[in-house]
Image (spheres, helix red, strand yellow):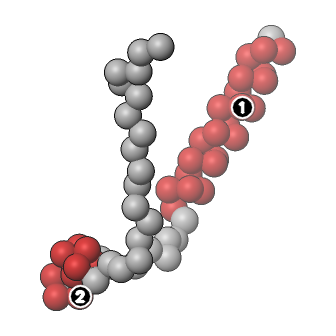
Amino acid sequence: MRRIGLFAIAAAMIATGVGVWATSATNARVSPSMGQGIEPLQMMMNAKGLAAAELADYTFVFH
């Protein structure tokens, strides 16, 4: 009987939490229109001074 009571309390708390989460107001912004978005091509063309990746290939190292 004790387990059933604890389960009922846990289920009620979970249901309350989900209900509060579902009805809470959000501050999400509306996505921008097509003319106001980020242009990845312009970002890549204007990128300067980025660090260069170095790769050390030790595939065929024989001792």
Residue 24 vertical placement versus 27 (above, below): above
Mark 2: few/some/many CA within 10 Å (<14, 14-19, 20+):
few
Disc 1: which residue? 10
What's the CA distance linking mark 2 and mark 1?
47 Å
**Position of residue 3 in the picture relative to residue 18 (left or right):** right
Label ID, residue 36: 2
Mark 1: few/some/many CA within 10 Å (<14, 14-19, 20+):
few
x and y, in percent, of residue 3 in the image: 78, 14
Q: Amino acid at mark 1?
A: Ala
**Position of residue 45 in the picture relative to residue 49 (left or right):** left
Q: Nearer the viewer, residue 60 or 27?
A: 60
x and y, in percent, of residue 44 in the image: 25, 74
Q: Within the image, what quadrant is residue 39 found in? A: bottom left
x and y, in percent, of residue 33 in the image: 20, 83
Query: Does residue 32 show up?
Result: no
Question: For the point 56% across and 51% down, which residue is it?
Answer: 19
Q: Nearer the viewer, residue 56 or 62?
A: 62
x and y, in percent, of residue 20 in the image: 59, 56
Question: For the point 36% across and 24% down, which residue is it?
Answer: 59
